[in-house]
Amino acid sequence: MRKKLNPSSDTTLPLEDSAVTDLKIIPDVVQSSLFPDLPEDGAEVKTPKKAKSKPVVTPDPLPAEKLMEADDDEFSPENLRLLNKIDLRDLVITELVELPARKPKKGEWFRVHPDYHQQGGILELDGERKVFWVAKKIQSQVAHDACFTFRLCVLCVSQEGVPFIWPVKTDVEAGGTGSKWVRIPFEAMTKGREKWTRLYWSDEKREHVVLTNDLLDAPKFPDKPFSELLKLAFKGAVISTVDHPAILNLKGKAK
């Protein structure tokens, strides 16, 4: 049986009172340990300062090369827009790669270079509509053939700026008073050295017609030596041996 103590003489608290005292202490301990930042009773509450916002940095756009690497689709709108920025004038090839040997077309205006001219032996095959340059060493083999003539090769340029070599028939042996089929084209070539000229055949007159024009712009001739231009015009069309297919064809021989 538990003995009751006199409160006035004994300072020891009963078991029940001690437990109650401990329960009062626990909330303060828990509060301080779990929420250390909470202010004490009566303390001034400070409003935390607002953090400064950092500026948003936008990355620079990728260069065109990176965009092309990132997108492998050659026909995507982005890549096609990049290609459209190319100046097509930078892609134009100005190097002269071919130069035809022919007479002026009936509908074209042309000019003749005043200094570029060279006489040569020309073999013209009507069926192939092709002219060959015959080397001097074998001209005797075809000298009496109707397809062979000595012509004056001149440099011409059309109004569109297209150059060509014109092997003009000459009438030197007749003193310039021979056939009108030779004389009139030769006169057109002479006029073309100073004026824009047009040469065409008239069925009504049964002869060539020559027109001149002073209103067109100055001609622009290729800036190359005439020897190089002749070599380019007769590239693959030089007869230097008697067994050339063109000569064998004239003699009725098969190679």
Image (cartoon, rainbow, N blue to C red):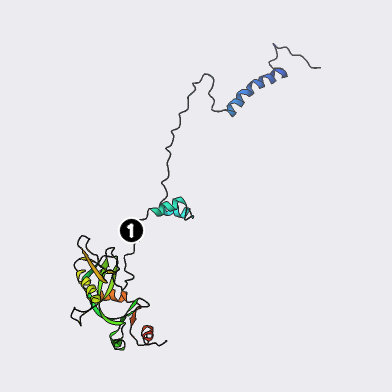
- Residue at the spot x=22%, y=73% of the render? 184
- Residue at the spot x=35%, y=57% of the render? 88
Residue 51, given in percent of the width and then of the height, sits at: 45, 32
Going by the numbered disc 1, the residue's amino acid type is: Arg
Q: Quadrant of the N terminus?
A: top right
Relative to residue 118, is residue 218 depicted above or below?
Answer: above
Residue 246 in the figure: left or right of residue 44: left
Residue 75, given in percent of the width and then of the height, sits at: 47, 54
Q: Quadrant of the C terminus?
A: bottom left
Q: Foreground residue, 121 or 31? A: 121
Q: Foreground residue, 136 or 69? A: 136
Could you say which quadrant of the image residue 147 lies in?
bottom left
Relative to residue 242, is residue 13 depicted above or below?
Answer: above
The residue that mark 1 highlights is 89
Could you say which quadrant of the image residue 226 lies in?
bottom left
| Residue 16 seen anywhere in this rendered image of the structure | yes
Relative to residue 63, is residue 58 depicted above or below?
Answer: above
- Residue at the spot x=42%, y=54% of the render? 65
Residue extending farthest right: 1
Could you say which quadrant of the image residue 52 lies in?
top left
Residue 55, given in percent of the width and then of the height, sits at: 42, 37
Q: Foreground residue, 59 or 11? A: 59
| Residue 224 seen anywhere in this rendered image of the structure | no
Q: Foreground residue, 243 or 84? A: 243
Residue 228, given in percent of the width and then of the height, sits at: 28, 75
Secondary element under disc 1, as helix, strand or loop, is helix
